[in-house]
Image (cartoon, rainbow, N blue to C red):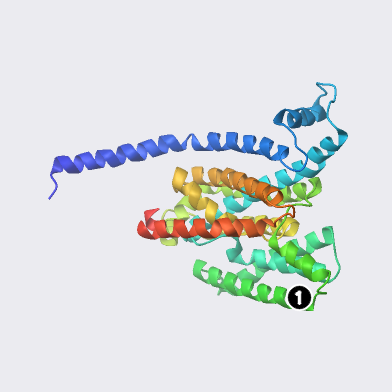
């Protein structure tokens, strides 16, 4: 048996390690914010029109206050301001929103396999957009239908999961799986009925997710859906910490369990519906990124939520850079996020299982 002095030394080592991790995690968010700014500036420079960071900086500053005599080509100014900046902003907002909602849902459900699509919003919004394309609707009619179907799927999930006025998280997950399966089948039917030469390729490409055609109005719509929802989730960070201990313990500590659950669910639904409506289905971001953030700063949602958001913004920004530069034809974002997300998540899942599951996180 180990001596008492050995036990004391081991306890001191664990305490020192925990204190060091807590101290180190305080520098993670500022470092990630600096990395996000650098990645943003770099992302504007890459593409078919070569630009330097100085060129991009001057072009952007010139819109606020003319500091130099314009020396750049007008085409370069259009490329920066009308083509690259809107899609870069869209990637940042989408990555931030999906990752933050994924981190909140994993804590809420106490399940590392949960992502924003678990409540059926992704499939519902995907069907709404598919139906709009099938009916020949474009532009903001498509956005409206996708968003409404996404939000409507939440009410269907709530209707199915509520029995005698009470809703359990397990029943909610099962209802989300049922609704997702229903809308996935409906999407398949719509693709079967679509014109194979025009509408079917449009539906297929839209479902794979892309921000190639994003403009400032799309970014505004994304911000309206993501920013208030992300703020609501962050304000509930301490309640999410309590709920991650389990419903029984949370009720014993006086948490308003049902209210917190539905605020987080509705906020996540708004984020997912807004993303799918403007950009199609972009998967694996809200599932994988929170695990990476948790490895950096731990499971405390006060640090985990903002770190997940910023890390997700950086990740999707870099993925979009790959999508538009790897080949001459742009690759849909959903394909790249799946190709990267599947092996990364497999590694995370193995490590999580080796550590004893969720409780060991």
121 vs 285, nearest the viewer: 285
Q: Could you tell me residue 173's position as x and y percent? A: 54, 68
Residue at 50% x, 37% y: name it. 28
* Residue beneath disc 1: 190
Q: Report which quarter residue 121 is drawn in.
A: bottom right
Residue at 76% x, 47% y: name it. 220
Residue 227 at least partly seen = no
Q: Could you tell me residue 226's position as x and y percent? A: 67, 50
* Circle count: 1
Is 19 on the left or on the right of 128, as rendered? left
Residue at 58% x, 59% y: name it. 339
SS type, badge 1: helix
Is 165 on the left or on the right of 216, as rendered? left
Residue 285 at least partly seen = yes
Q: Could you tell me residue 233's position as x and y percent? A: 58, 50
Q: Residue furthest front?
A: 328
Within-10-Å neighbours for mark 1: few <14, some 14–19, many 20+:
some
- Please say if 238 is above or below 149: above
Is 215 on the left or on the right of 124, as rendered? right
Q: Could you tell me residue 165's position as x and y percent? A: 56, 71
Residue at 75% x, 78% y: name it. 192
- Please say if 211 is above or below 9: below
Q: Report which quarter residue 153 is drawn in.
A: bottom right
């Amino acid at each position: 048996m180990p001596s008492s002095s050995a036990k004391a030394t081991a306890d001191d080592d664990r305490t020192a390690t925990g204190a060091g991790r807590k101290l180190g995690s305080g520098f993670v968010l500022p470092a990630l914010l600096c990395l996000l700014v650098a990645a943003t500036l770099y992302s504007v420079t890459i593409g078919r029109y070569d630009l330097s960071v100085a060129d991009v900086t001057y072009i952007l500053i010139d819109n606020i206050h003319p500091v130099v005599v314009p020396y750049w080509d007008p085409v370069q100014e259009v490329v920066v301001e009308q083509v690259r900046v809107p899609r870069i902003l869209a990637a940042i907002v989408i990555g931030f929103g999906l990752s933050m909602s994924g981190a909140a849902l994993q804590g809420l459900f106490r399940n590392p396999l949960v992502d924003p699509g678990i409540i059926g919003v992704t499939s519902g919004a995907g069907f709404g957009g598919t139906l709009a394309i099938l009916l020949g609707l474009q532009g903001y009619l498509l956005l409206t239908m996708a968003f409404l179907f996404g939000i409507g799927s939440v009410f269907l999930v709530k209707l199915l999961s509520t029995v005698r006025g009470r809703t359990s998280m397990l029943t909610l997950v099962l209802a989300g799986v049922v609704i997702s399966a229903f809308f996935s089948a409906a999407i398949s039917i719509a693709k079967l009925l679509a014109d194979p030469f025009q509408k079917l390729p449009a539906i297929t490409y839209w479902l794979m997710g892309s921000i190639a055609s994003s403009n400032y109005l799309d970014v505004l719509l994304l911000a309206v859906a993501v920013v208030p929802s992300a703020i609501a989730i962050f304000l509930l960070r301490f309640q999410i910490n309590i709920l991650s201990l389990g419903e029984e313990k949370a009720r014993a500590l006086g948490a308003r369990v049902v209210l917190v659950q539905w605020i987080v669910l509705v906020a996540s639904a708004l984020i997912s519906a807004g993303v799918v409506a403007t950009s199609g289905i972009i998967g694996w971001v809200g599932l994988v990124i929170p695990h990476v953030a948790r490895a950096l700063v731990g499971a405390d949602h006060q640090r985990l939520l903002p770190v997940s958001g910023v890390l997700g913004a950086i990740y999707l920004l870099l993925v979009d850079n790959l999508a538009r530069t790897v080949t001459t034809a742009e690759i849909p974002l959903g394909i790249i996020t799946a190709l990267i997300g599947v092996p990364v998540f497999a590694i995370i899942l193995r490590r999580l299982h080796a550590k004893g599951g969720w409780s060991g996180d």
